[in-house]
């Protein structure tokens, strides 16, 4: 049941990303180009996502547990630190440069375009390098 649920949610998410145009890097890049060919339509996509999330959390978190899990998996860290700000900045820079965010790139793999595959490979490489750096720093801190 979990696998089927994940599949259906993924299909809905992918369809929403495709319908909103977020798999088109030109549309995303035009959103960031406020001095040129600015396309404000993604504000409505983001606003819709924000409203849905806000309302959804209010409804869902009143339940004792999710339907297919024993408990909710919510983040416990509420600190705004250098790592969070740096990660957000890198995410924004990558999105602005490539025109893809990870959430939009995965559904865009279905387009078969080479630049999407290149982005996903670079994304996975970046995640791997970041994990190696964090593991290295943890080892150094443990021996110090």
Image (cartoon, rainbow, N blue to C red):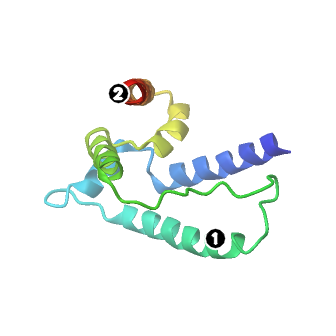
**Residue at the spot x=66%, y=54% of the render?**
73
**Residue at the spot x=44%, y=25% of the render?**
128
Residue 139 vertical placement versus 110 (above, below): above
Q: Is residue 120 left or right of residue 13?
A: left
SS state under label 2:
loop
Q: Residue 54: horizontal and vertical position, in percent? A: 55, 73
Q: Is disc 2 surrounded by few (<14), some (14 to 19) or many (20+) residues within 10 Å? A: few
First-in-chain label (1 vs 2) = 1
Q: Quadrant of residue 114?
A: top left
Tell me the quarter of the image containing the C terminus: top left
Q: Quadrant of residue 143?
A: top left
Q: Name the front one of labels 1 and 2.
A: 2
Q: Can the viewer see residue 27 in this picture? A: no
Residue at the disc numbered 1 = 56
Please identify the residue farthest to the right as the structure is shown: 1
Q: Is residue 32 left or right of residue 9?
A: left
Tell me the quarter of the image containing the N terminus: top right
Q: Can the viewer see residue 8 in this picture? A: yes
Residue 45 vertical placement versus 118 (above, below): below
**Residue at the spot x=66%, y=46% of the render?**
10
Q: Nearer the viewer, residue 42 or 51?
A: 51
Please identify the residue farthest to the left as the structure is shown: 35
**Residue at the spot x=52%, y=37% of the render?**
106
Q: Quadrant of residue 40?
A: bottom left
Q: Nearer the viewer, residue 52 or 113?
A: 52
Q: Residue 135: horizontal and vertical position, in percent? A: 44, 26
Q: Is disc 1 surrounded by few (<14), some (14 to 19) or many (20+) residues within 10 Å? A: few
Q: Residue 82: horizontal and vertical position, in percent? A: 29, 50
Badge number at residue 144: 2
């Amino acid at each position: 049941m979990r696998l089927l649920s994940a599949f259906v949610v993924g299909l809905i998410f992918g369809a929403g990303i495709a319908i909103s145009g977020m798999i088109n890097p030109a549309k995303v890049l035009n959103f960031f180009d406020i001095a040129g060919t600015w396309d404000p339509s993604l504000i409505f996509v983001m606003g819709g996502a924000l409203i849905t999330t806000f309302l959804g959390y209010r409804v869902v978190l009143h339940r004792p547990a999710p339907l297919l899990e024993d408990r909710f998996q919510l983040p416990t860290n509420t600190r705004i630190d250098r790592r969070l700000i740096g990660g957000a900045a890198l995410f924004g820079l990558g999105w602005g440069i490539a025109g893809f965010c990870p959430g939009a790139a995965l559904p865009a793999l279905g387009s078969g375009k080479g630049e999407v595959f290149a982005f996903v490979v670079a994304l996975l490489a970046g995640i791997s390098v970041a994990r190696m750096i964090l593991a290295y720093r943890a080892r150094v801190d443990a021996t110090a």
